[in-house]
């Protein structure tokens, strides 16, 4: 076995390395190392660096990815990018180089909202909180799950308690999240050997009933995890902990001023025209509007931006820059995010996923409850692993973005960020998804199964600003025209947004 360990400058990784059999070769990787690992090959670098990845994966048969849990970088955006894009690239590169198994380290803290009252196990849906410490491992889970779904790379996700050693346990008040490092090592060793295919999650906790998330399916025969440490000698030092409580929901407010991110694209251009008569609008994009006006249309008949007239304004804002996003939201009542990068494998994650985090952070900071998020429909994976064989795809079926076009999985991560923020802070986040935009005056020869005109799509976004609320903080819906194709029903958007498309493209599909 030739093993790559990322996030290797951690207590768990160092203990694992010391416990491995002598016939296992190890390559330890992290952004930096606080101290040498004696007798071990160590490499410092980032999973976001594809050249570095190719180098460290050379000759590797097994990978343990602890980066989302333990690697600390200069700021939140860098950590999220390393955990999301880095893990996604690591998994895809592992498949390409013939790696036999990938193990991801994650956290049981996802279940904090539940563990005072329930005994969640591996079959329960995680409830991550919108902190970098939880978003990094959770979004890495989502990214690796989609790679495993498409490639069937054996990918084992170990959600761990807080890993501690004897010295820590002896010098700190007892915490029911604790997992002894020796038990964590045993779980990793088991994960390297147990039979597996595709995606599988195991919960790795301390022994006994005091632990926050007791051992469940991981203790059964298929995995056979049997922890030995329950920290009984430390129980008396436990301090009272308050029950989990979400913050008070951010209240709604009258919407008069709206900031739009990604206003330089054709959807943003249509939206600016739609909103200008109803709101004071702050339009933003990464370039000045005059520069964007000179770029050829995205498709025949696609709108181009125009300079806004007072009281509306244009600002140069990069959604990858948290400070710029925060400043752009100051004084606003609502946010619309139509920013997107489709093809660049670096900026797709930095704009679509990390940019969504910056927008949601700014919304919370400024007390903005209404955030309209947009993106592509998430059903792009073909064949039996997706919905390519199906012909009635309602809005709320689980996403199947595939992995071949970086646009889709990166947008999926951004949508998960929005959902997590919305549920935690009681926001109102309608998420509108599209597949094909059409100018009715320049009709294509073929209409997608989910197509809509530019102005109908802009009108749907305005409707999403005007509704009183949603059944739940985050609602996902398809925006499509009334066509006879029947594959993507648009009833949810009509019902929740009070929206009615005007263009149906009948000339394309009607019998002549």
Image (cartoon, rainbow, N blue to C red):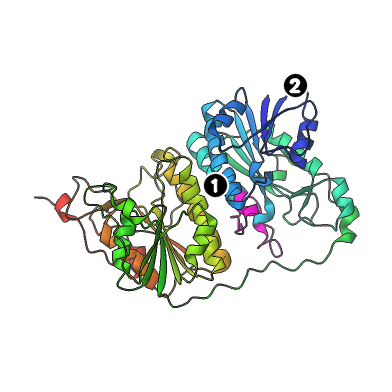
Membership of 32 in magenta stretch: no
- Determine whether 419 is above or below 347 in the image: below
Membership of 121 in magenta stretch: yes
Kindly give the residue lying farthest to the bottom in the view shown: 254
Q: From the top left corner, tell me how far across and down residue 100 is, in percent.
A: 59, 28
Q: From the top left corner, tell me how far across and down residue 246 is, in percent.
A: 63, 68
The residue identified by callout 1 is: 142
Q: Earlier in the sequence, mark 1 or mark 2?
A: 2
Question: Would you say 39 lies left or right of 476 here?
Answer: right
Q: From the top left corner, tell me how far across and down residue 203 is, in percent.
A: 68, 47
Q: Secondary structure at mark 1?
A: helix
Task: From the image, give the main secondary structure of the stretch colored magenta.
Answer: loop
**For the N terminus, which image quadrant?**
top right
How packed mark 2 is, by other alpha carbons closer than 10 Å (few <14, some 14-19, many 20 or more), is: few
Point out the stretch of residues depicted in magenta.
Answer: 111-136
Question: Would you say 353 lies left or right of 491 here?
Answer: right
Give the quadrant of residue 255.
bottom left
Q: Residue at x 59, y 43 (%)?
A: 82
User: Residue 401, can we see it?
Assistant: no
The residue identified by callout 2 is: 23
How packed mark 1 is, by other alpha carbons closer than 10 Å (few <14, some 14-19, many 20 or more), is: some
- Determine whether 266 is above or below 228 in the image: below
């Amino acid at each position: 076995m030739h093993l790559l360990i990322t996030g290797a400058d951690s207590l768990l990784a160092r203990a694992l390395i010391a416990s491995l059999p002598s016939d296992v070769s190890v390559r330890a990787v992290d952004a930096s190392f606080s101290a040498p690992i004696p007798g071990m090959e160590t490499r410092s670098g980032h999973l976001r660096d594809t050249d570095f990845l190719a180098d460290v994966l050379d000759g590797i048969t097994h990978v343990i990815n602890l980066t989302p849990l333990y690697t600390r970088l200069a700021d939140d955006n860098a950590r999220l990018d390393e955990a999301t894009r880095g893990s996604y690239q690591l998994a895809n590169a592992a498949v390409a180089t013939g790696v036999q198994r990938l193990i991801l380290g994650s956290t049981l803290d996802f279940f904090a909202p539940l563990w005072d009252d329930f005994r969640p196990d591996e079959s329960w849906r995680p409830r991550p909180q919108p902190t970098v410490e939880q978003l990094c491992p959770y979004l890495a889970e989502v990214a690796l799950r989609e790679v495993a779904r498409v490639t069937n790379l054996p990918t084992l996700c170990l959600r761990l308690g807080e890993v501690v050693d004897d010295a820590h346990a002896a010098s700190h008040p007892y915490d029911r999240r604790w997992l002894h490092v020796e038990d964590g090592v045993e779980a990793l060793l088991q994960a390297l050997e147990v039979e597996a295919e595709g995606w599988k999650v195991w919960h790795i906790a301390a022994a006994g009933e005091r632990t926050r998330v007791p051992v469940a399916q991981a203790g059964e025969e298929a995995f056979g995890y049997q922890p030995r440490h329950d920290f009984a000698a430390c129980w008396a030092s436990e301090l009272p902990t308050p029950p989990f409580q979400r913050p008070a929901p951010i209240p709604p407010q009258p919407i008069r001023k709206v900031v739009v991110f990604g206003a330089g694209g054709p959807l943003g251009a249509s939206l600016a025209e739609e909103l200008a008569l109803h709101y004071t609008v702050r339009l933003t994009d990464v370039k000045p509007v005059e520069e964007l006006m000179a770029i050829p249309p995205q498709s025949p008949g696609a709108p181009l931006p125009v300079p806004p007239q007072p009281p509306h304004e244009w600002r140069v804002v990069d959604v990858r820059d948290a400070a710029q996003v925060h400043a752009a939201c100051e004084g606003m009542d609502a946010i619309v995010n139509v920013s997107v990068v489709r093809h660049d494998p670096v900026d797709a994650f930095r704009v679509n996923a990390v940019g969504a985090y910056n927008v949601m952070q700014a919304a919370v900071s400024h007390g903005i409850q209404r955030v309209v998020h947009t993106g592509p429909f998430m059903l792009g994976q073909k064949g039996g692993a997706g919905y390519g064989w199906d012909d009635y795809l309602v809005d709320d079926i689980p996403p199947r973005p595939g992995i071949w076009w970086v646009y889709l999985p990166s947008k999926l991560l951004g949508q998960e960020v929005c959902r997590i923020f919305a549920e935690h802070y009681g926001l109102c986040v309608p998420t509108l998804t599209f597949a094909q935009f059409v100018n009715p005056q320049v009709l294509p020869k073929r209409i997608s199964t989910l197509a809509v005109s530019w102005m109908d799509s802009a009108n749907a976004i305005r409707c999403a600003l005007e509704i009183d609320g949603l059944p739940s903080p985050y609602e996902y819906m398809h925006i499509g025209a009334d066509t006879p194709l029947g594959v993507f029903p648009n009833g949810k958007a009509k019902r929740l947004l009070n929206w009615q498309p005007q263009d149906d493209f009948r000339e394309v599909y009607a019998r002549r």
